[in-house]
Amino acid sequence: MPVARAAAAADGPTVAIDIGGTKIAGALVHPDGTMTATTRRPTPRGTDADGVMAAVTEVVAELSRSPLWTTAARCGIGSAGPVDASRGTVSPVNIGAWREFPVQARIEAELAARGAELPTVLAGDGVAMTAAEHWLGAARGHANALCMVVSTGVGGGLVLNNQLHPGPTGNAGHIGHISVAFDGEPCVCGGRGCVESIASGTAIARWALAQGWTPAGDASAAGVAVAAEAGDPIALAAFDRAGRALAAAIAATATLVETDIAVVGGGVATSGDTLFEPIRRHLASYATLSFVRDLKVVPATLGTHAGLIGAAAAATMLLPS
């Protein structure tokens, strides 16, 4: 039965939903960035589209039990991509059951069934992370910023003149598919020499193995990072190659739209200076014009909270106040 709903204040909490390949999380995110009623479910495997949606429904249902539910002002959805925010659909690479799935309309219907007919925004996870880092993280105070996630894939988003800039379909700032190697290997997107095909965690591990690296146990990018820290030359070369690709893309983006900071998060970024040292070293060779020479590259600070905080921040930034 729908709950009775109080008039939502503009400064009420945001219903935040974070959809990824391993988990579906939800929270009420408050104007100061604190979260309450946090909940999560594993992303279902081996099921159809409605089976995955059932987990989202459970998350929304649990959030609706919060005593603050009736004061919610808006809803933000952050999802693994590709997304099409203009249509409200998602086709996450890591959720095979969803292809052009109308997630925004389905979540809006679930909200309405629980007495919360809220304005809703859909954002890709890179755009959501960007909104989060600009609001409360490493890009706070910067009017123009590039934020990126370097993990299994490489994604990102842009803040320009203190405004989140997702583009018409929500994919602006998708730095992972900028080509940085003219004769590079084919990318899963159909292009060639993309940043993602060189600098993603998957690409780093694949290249190291192809060059003869012998893992001590962990054959992922994390294992390559451990080997690089121990001085393994192939592992160091793999991260140098990734850092150079990221530096080229960061410099190109900054030159195009004049960002003054690049924030890098995601699993590969947890390797610390193993990744950031080559990025910064190579950046000096690419960011040479006067207006990008002082470009800073820094680690993201919000970690696992970026998805939910970012979904809320994207909704707040993109919806009319």
Image (spheres, rainbow, N blue to C red):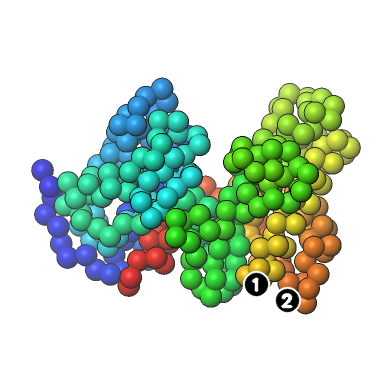
Mark drawn on residue 16: none
Number of disc labels: 2
Q: Say whether residue 204 is left or right of residue 68.
A: right
The amino acid sitting under disc 1 is Glu
What residue sits right under mark 1 in the picture?
258
Q: Say whether residue 27 is left or right of residue 285.
A: left
* Percent coordinates x, y for residue 304 in the rendering: 52, 47
**Which quarter of the rendering shows the C terminus?**
bottom left
* Percent coordinates x, y for residue 280 in the rendering: 78, 59
Residue drawn at 58 percent across, 50 percent down: 155
At label 2, counting other C-alpha atoms closer than 10 Å, the crowd grade (few under 14, some 14-19, many 20 or more) is: few
Give 211 or 275, whichever is nearer the viewer: 211
Q: Which quarter of the picture shows residue 61?
A: top left
Residue drawn at 53 percent across, 52 percent down: 126
Asked if the residues shown at circle 2 and circle 1 are in contact, with their CB atoms under 8 angstroms apart, the answer is: yes
At label 1, counting other C-alpha atoms closer than 10 Å, the crowd grade (few under 14, some 14-19, many 20 or more) is: some
* Percent coordinates x, y for residue 89 in the rendering: 37, 46
The amino acid sitting under disc 2 is Phe
Q: Which quarter of the picture shows residue 197?
A: top right
What residue sits right under mark 2 in the picture?
291
Residue drawn at 30 percent across, 31 percent down: 50
**Which quarter of the rendering shows the N terminus?**
top left
Separation of residues labelled 2 and 1 (CA atoms)? 7 Å
Secondary structure of the residue carrying tag 1 is loop
Can you say whether 103 is above or below 48 in the image? below
- Reading the chain from its start, which is encountered first: label 2 or label 1? 1
Residue drawn at 73 percent across, 51 percent down: 180
